[in-house]
Image (tube, helix red, strand yellow):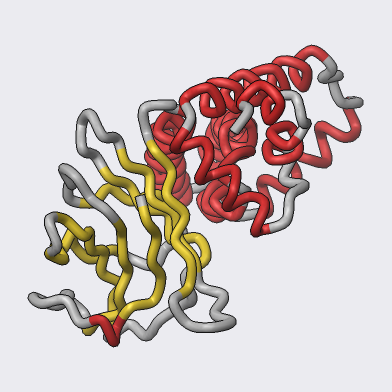
Amino acid sequence: MNIQDYLSSGTLELYVLDQLTPAERLEVERLRAQYPEIQRELASIESTFEKVAMQEAVEPPARLESALFQQLHELNPVRTLTAVHSARPMMYGLVASVAIALATSAIAMLYHNQLEKTTTSAAAAARQAQALTQASVKLEKENFVLKDPAFMKIMMGSVSPGGKDGACIFWNPHTRQIYIDDCNLHEIDPSAQYQLWSEENGQMVSLGVFENDRTLQLQKPAAQPKSFVVTLEKKGGAVAFNEKNMIVKGKV
């Protein structure tokens, strides 16, 4: 493969802008894991796009800013932060940065307004502000993981023909840390739970269960995984791996 021709083909720019088909995106994911040059170029493209966005940004009119804050006041800010996880991973960094800024403003506004009410209302506002602050801190940490080039990204597709389930693994070969993004796994019954497994030395090793809550979740570390699998189990997880319970799978 001629790396230089591929880098100048425009495919990576379309990937960052989320303009490729699912099959084309998977091909880019495979190549970026195989060629460090592609990984570096993607990081450079993302950085350039973010810089351009910041340089071209304009201050919104006062009436628009007022309307925006009114909407934030009427919405649940924690739910607004959670909605960030529906964004594509490649654009996650930019979206997360905007969400964090909005969250900070929302904290100040909510706390100021509620202090003018009764003591009970002020206490409720303080609890809400604390929850929003914790969500902001968590979002910043997730943003760091998604933008750290040390983490490999492994896409997991449905094992069922025509299935729409999907998930994404972020694995750091140096620290062995593993995060899973369950954004495309279907909702399940409260009596069930998803469980992550890794294939190592011919054995399936449990990396723990995780909640289906659309967040980036830290799992048990893995040294030399060849693939990752998610199964659907009863609440609490299973001791032994059962191939019949597989939902999604992805090779490293």
Location of residue 31 in the rendering, given as x and y in whole percent from the top left corner:
53, 39
* Vertical placement of residue 23 versus 190, above or below: above
Q: Nearer the viewer, residue 55 or 207?
A: 207
In percent of the image, x 70 and y 17: which residue is there? 48
* Vertical placement of residue 105 versus 113, above or below: above
In percent of the image, x 55 and y 30: which residue is there? 104
Count of labels in the image: 0
In percent of the image, x 16 and y 43: which residue is there? 223
User: Would you identify the image quadrant in which residue 109 lies?
Assistant: top right
Residue lying farthest to the front in this orientation: 1
Location of residue 238 in the rendering, given as x and y in whole percent from the top left corner:
14, 77
Question: Which quadrant, please, contains the N terminus?
Answer: top right
Location of residue 26 in the rendering, given as x and y in whole percent from the top left corner:
58, 52
Tell me if residue 141 can be seen. yes
Tell me if residue 119 can be seen. no
Location of residue 18 in the rendering, given as x and y in whole percent from the top left corner:
72, 45
User: Would you identify the image quadrant in which residue 209 lies?
Assistant: bottom left
* Vertical placement of residue 190 versus 110, above or below: below
Q: Nearer the viewer, residue 71 or 12?
A: 12
